[in-house]
Image: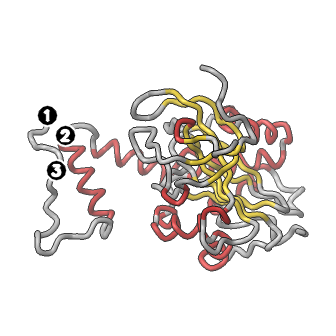
């Protein structure tokens, strides 16, 4: 067992020149990982395997397949919007995350966008690792307060004034996935081709699919 | 478990009660008035295991922020014991 007393003193600066908290989150994460490995709680191999799985194998593909299926199967879409966790479980995509999933639908008059203002809750099993900007204090502060302006200035997503923006401030028990609008002119596409169209950002809600092609308002 | 105390459509106030082992209520919503959009169901607290109703609440940015953007709303999930009815209700 550990012979150090809590709180651990990590030597990252001198008392005269302390390293400000949050200045270097990567260094803090490395320090945390070292302590956990040293204490025998996790192994470096296990961490590498999980990161690699979410970076390379899962990515946003699971979410894109859920969206494509919802676009083509009205019964599945109805189940997805009623009980996201169960519908996604049908496809076998509920992974190691224990949180439930609620799917929120974009329509010609509604645009949903997801943020976690307290930390970085994210549907890993559907979208892979959260992008760095999603975890940044700037995104977390601005998206909740100035969503229309932030979507426009930071993401180039111009949301018409007559479209209601619903900011989903997510937390531990329930993760949110945005169901984007299906672009018109995609009736001939297969399920796989539709899934290829669906971007991670559109499922977070910082991109508005369909808007360029659909007459709104 | 009894029925949820606040059915869909109920107006509630976000209190300063810290109802779990970790912080769940963002500061910007302290004292805010919200409406129950739906009831997620009963969930255990991740740290204490205590089971409580979890609510999906809708807030009007005009009640929360200075200089709010029009035609927007904010949604947040909170535990039942972090909420109360507004006065005179």
Q: Position of residue B13 (x, y in %)?
A: 60, 47
Viewed as shown, does residue B21 lie left or right of B27? left
Residue carrying label 1 = A1
Q: Secondary structure at mark 2?
A: loop
Viewed as shown, does residue A113 lie left or right of A81? left
- Decide: is A119 above or below A101: below
Q: Are discs 1 and 2 less than 8 Å apart at CB?
A: yes
Q: Secondary structure at mark 1?
A: loop
Label 2 chain ID:
A
Q: Depth-wise, is mark 1 or mark 3 nearer the camera?
A: 3
Specify how the rendered protein is coloured: secondary structure
Label 3 chain ID:
A
Residue carrying label 3 = A8
Residue A198, can we see it?
no
Whether callout 3 and callout 2 share a subunit is answered: yes
Residue carrying label 2 = A39
Q: Position of residue A188 (x, y in %)?
A: 89, 56
Viewed as shown, does residue B37 lie left or right of A132? right
Whether callout 1 and callout 2 share a subunit is answered: yes
In the foreground, A21 or A83:
A21
Looking at marks 1 and 3 on the same chain, the residue that comes earlier in the sequence is marked by 1
Rate crowding at label 2 as few (under 14), some (14 to 19) or many (20 or more) other CA atoms within 10 Å. few
Q: At x 27% / y 50%, what residue is drawn?
A: A33
Label 1 chain ID:
A
């Amino acid at each position: 067992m550990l012979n150090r007393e809590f709180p651990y003193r990590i030597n990252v600066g001198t008392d005269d020149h302390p390293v400000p908290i949050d200045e270097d989150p990567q260094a803090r994460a490395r320090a945390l990982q070292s302590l956990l490995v040293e204490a025998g709680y996790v192994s470096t191999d296990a961490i590498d395997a999980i990161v690699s799985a979410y970076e390379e194998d899962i990515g946003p593909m699971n979410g894109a397949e859920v969206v494509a299926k919802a676009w083509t199967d009205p019964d599945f879409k109805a189940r997805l919007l009623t009980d996201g966790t169960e519908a996604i479980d049908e496809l076998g995509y509920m992974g190691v995350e224990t949180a439930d999933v609620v799917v929120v639908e974009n329509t010609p008059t509604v645009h949903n966008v997801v943020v976690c203002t307290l930390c970085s809750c994210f549907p890993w099993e559907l979208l892979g690792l959260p992008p760095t900007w999603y975890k940044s204090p700037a995104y977390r502060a601005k998206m909740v307060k100035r969503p229309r302006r932030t979507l426009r200035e930071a993401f180039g997503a111009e949301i018409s004034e007559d479209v209601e923006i619903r900011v989903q401030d997510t937390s531990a028990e329930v993760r949110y996935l945005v169901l984007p609008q299906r672009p018109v002119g995609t009736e001939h596409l297969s399920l796989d081709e539709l899934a290829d169209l669906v971007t991670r950002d559109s499922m977070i809600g910082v991109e508005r699919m369909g808007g360029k092609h659909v007459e709104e308002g | 478990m009894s029925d949820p105390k606040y059915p869909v459509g109920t107006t509630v106030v976000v209190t300063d009660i810290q109802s779990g082992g970790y912080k769940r209520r963002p500061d910007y919503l302290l004292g805010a008035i919200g409406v129950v959009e739906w009831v997620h169901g009963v969930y255990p607290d991740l740290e204490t295991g205590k089971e409580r109703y979890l609510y999906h609440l809708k807030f009007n940015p005009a009640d929360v922020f200075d200089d709010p953007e029009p035609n927007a709303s904010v949604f947040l999930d909170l535990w039942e014991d972090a909420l109360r009815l507004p006065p005179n209700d």
